[in-house]
Amino acid sequence: MKPQAVPQSVAQSDHELDKHHHESQADEHGDEHHFKEYSPKELQSIKIQGVVCLLGGIALHFVLGTFYLWGGISPYVGAYMKDKDPSVTQSTLQIVFPILGIATNSVLSFGVKLAQRIGFKTMIAGAGFLISLAFLILSFINNIYGFILIYCFMIGIPSGLVYMLPIICGWKFFPFNRGMVSGLIIAGYGFGAFTFNFICKAICNPNNEEPDIPFDEDGKVKKYFSRDVFENVPFMFQMLALSYFLLTIIATLLVKYPRDLNLEYQQVLGEGNKKPSGINHEKSVDYHPTVMHAECETLGQGMKSRPFWFLIVMVLCSIIFGMLMANCYKVFGQTLGIDDASLTVLGSVQSVCNGGSRFGWAVLFDKIGFKKVYLIIAVINLICTAAIGYIDKSYAGYFIILCITMCCEGGLFSCYPAVSAKIFGHKVGPIIYGGLFFVIGLSNMLGYLLYKFGEPKIGYGGVFWIVFGFCCVAFILGIFFKEDHDWKKK
């Protein structure tokens, strides 16, 4: 089984790069030892290199975890921008999160292909540098529209392009532990937001002041932080820029894509029946198990199928509650009378719940299948959306509901890629998977629109009941969803 050849032009450009970075030869080239069998000593060395690569991947996902940081820093940024432009409202700032989500999710499918052309290290270094530069630029911006443009696209697009890269590299070192690799690296995504939530709060609001500057917005009084808090926002962005730059250097040095390393072939030749778990995102160097059933052959065939449209609507309706709360948890928490320090702790813990739960859900998916996992999550979401409007300024109740919600959100993020591969096969599955991530961005935007236009008229309670309706649709579709599809019919 021979991998696809690397185009000559690409090989030449990589060769020029390797003149300055001899180490990257093993990182970017070489398939001549495709069927090489490794000695125990070599396997031990490879394992150590793999662990180092995982550490680099975790460092990179600490940077990418800035995606969930927005919900924690938006009240500080809102007060800062309100001082520069009185027309800025809370709902104006909340649009950042859904646009950021669309920008990130829309390019997820292209990152691996681009990295195989220009190099994994080059991609990681470039993306990390752009993200760091974006935060540095944000510290000098006073215009709200310029802020939204840079935050959403200069951070979102690079984040989406490199999200899968360390996971792909880790899979090369540990082809039979793909769930473990994905879980460990994505945990860094949650712990990144966890860590920097506390750092941002310590910089902007070390004295735990409450928002006490009232403004009338959409017929309601909204409170903003005082100058003592929001004047620290530029310094906060500068510290984030420095931190992300240092983490990018670490990730670039440690993450490595060994193109000529194919441990799955040695295992298959030696044991005959052991197969790597997880989802296959690699086409040039790939493990192809014997296909015992028909697969979806084309994207058009997949898009005409019933499972495709079921998944589109299920994703749209099931993700919305978690996305809404990730965006507005501090703003809503302030209406409950919860202080900023407590909300910062809550935001940090819910980020860990989101990222840290994905490995557990993936294991459960392997044991009981997508449909049962999905229905469990759908029922929990129904309970949480119905209960959140009745917590009545209870920090403990809010804490429990939000953490459970984010655990479920992590489960959905881990299961949708797996079910895409299971239903549509290794050829079309990754493409469908990329499309579903774009729908997640749309669901995020839908949650924002409900907040912007619904909250002023019907309050948060009314918005939550509308979201409850979406969760009901998700649950009903889950009942009738079928994981098996006969692609031979046509």
Image (cartoon, rainbow, N blue to C red):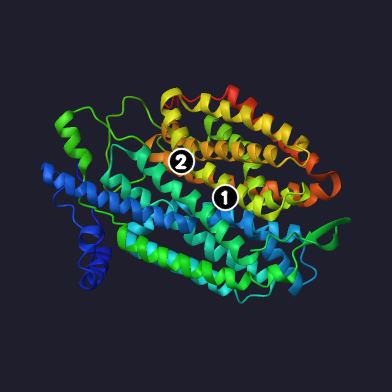
What residue is rendered at 44% in x and 31% in y?
423
Q: How far across and how far down the image is residue 198, in percent? A: 57, 57
Q: Is residue 358 above or below residue 195?
A: above
Instruction: Kindly identify which residue carries mark 1.
Output: 348
Q: Identify the residue shown where x is 52% and y is 45%.
A: 352
Residue 281 coordinates in the image, percent (x, y): 36, 45
- Label 1: state its secondary structure: helix
Quarter of the image where the C terminus is located: top left
Disc 2 from disc 1: Cα separation: 39 Å
Query: Percent from the top left, x then y, of residue 411?
Result: 52, 36
Can you say whether 433 is above or below 472 in the image?
below
**CB under 8 Å between discs 2 and 1:** no
Res. 340 visible in picture: yes
Q: Image quadrant for the N terminus?
A: top left
Left or right of 54? Residue 245 is: right
The amino acid at mark 2 is Leu
| Quarter occupied by residue 217 | bottom right
Amino acid tagged 1: Ser
Q: Nearer the viewer, mark 2 or mark 1?
A: 1
Neighbours of disc 2 within 10 Å: few (<14), some (14-19), many (20+): some
